Image: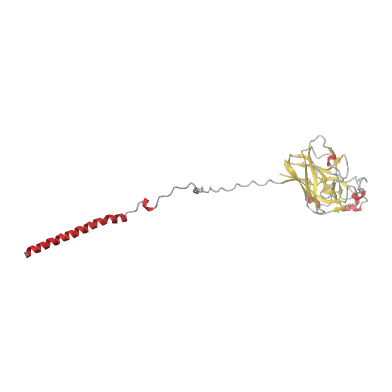
Amino acid sequence: MRGRGRASRTRASATLLTAVLAVAACTSDAAAPADETMDAPQDASEEAPPKAAPSPTDPPPAATPPPPAPSTPAPTPPPPAEVVEVATWPVAHRSEAVGVAGFWWGPSAFAEVAQSLLVPEPLELTELRFGVQRTSHAKDWETAPEETLAFGHGVTWEGTVPEGRFRVTIWPLDGPGDAVIDMAGIAPITEQTMVADIPIAGYGGSQRAELRLPEPVQLEAGHYLVSLGIDGFGDPDVFNLYTWGRTHGSTDQAGFDRDQGPMPCDYPTSTTDYPHGRAYYRVFSIIARPTLLENATTEFREHRAKVLAGSLSDCAYPDAFLPGDLELALIGR
């Protein structure tokens, strides 16, 4: 009996051990898929929710800016056009006492003066320049006695005459010109008007008035007559300019009225002149105060300038008038 009891207990223990091992195996098999699921990467659909469709009211996405263009050097600007000056006399001539002179020019008399000159090569003319030594002025000069204009007027040696009203006319010539020339039948190349302030240089000064042409003028090489008319000034008391120039030779027109014949004394005179032209004044059909430019004729006569040599103070007639040339410069390119 004891033998069968031990055998039964042995079989029962074996059966219990088998059952425990079976349960453990089942438990191990069930846990394996769970571990594999945790180690495997999650699906993209489980990582983030799907994006919403864009709303019609949403602003459009910003455009990607284009890549910067390759840098190129800026083009080199052309050099400025060279300024060309064609002049009868350089400004430095004013310091040469012998021959220096002042030509009378203004609406009281000699309302238009002119200079013939040579342009050696083609020029696009843009500006005219001239110098003024002094001015004459008198109150109510248009009706003042003649003696006032001759001897009782005031003189200004510095400052500026405002708003001079000018007319510039240019004709072609076939040479320097005779003492009297008539431009009838010859069409001017240009006629322009302008307003400009006039600096007064005085003795030793280098200032020049500048008349800028409203329209440039093309001049070919050759001789020309350049005429400058004055219609009036911004200062109503000014009636005359003495424009710089040079004289030469001797005179047969001594005295203020130029009616005393040759000078009865010796005086220094320049022996050189500008060889390509001469100074003129324009003849007017009506001489009045003021002389109106509309009354100009086509005739020009040789202008005479008052000699400024100090030695003339020893002469019986200190007023001497000699032929010569205006100090005139043509500026262009």
Residue 19 shows in the view: yes
Residue 241: % across, % down = 84, 49
> Residue 107 falls in which quadrant of the image?
top right
The residue located at (16%, 61%) in the rendering is 16
Identify which residue, 104 or 195, lies in the foreground: 195
* Side (left or right) of 162 relative to 47: right
Q: Residue furthest bottom?
A: 2
Residue 192: % across, % down = 77, 41
> Residue 28 falls in which quadrant of the image?
bottom left
* Side (left or right) of 234 relative to 60: right
Identify which residue, 331 or 96, lies in the foreground: 331
Q: Name above or below for residue 107 compared with residue 187.
A: below
Residue 48: % across, % down = 39, 52
* Side (left or right) of 287 relative to 218: right
Identify which residue, 75 or 268, lies in the foreground: 75
Residue 318 shows in the view: no
Identify which residue, 7 or 220, lies in the foreground: 7
Residue 279: % across, % down = 83, 43
**Quadrant of the snapshot with the N terminus:** bottom left
**Quadrant of the snapshot with the C terminus:** top right
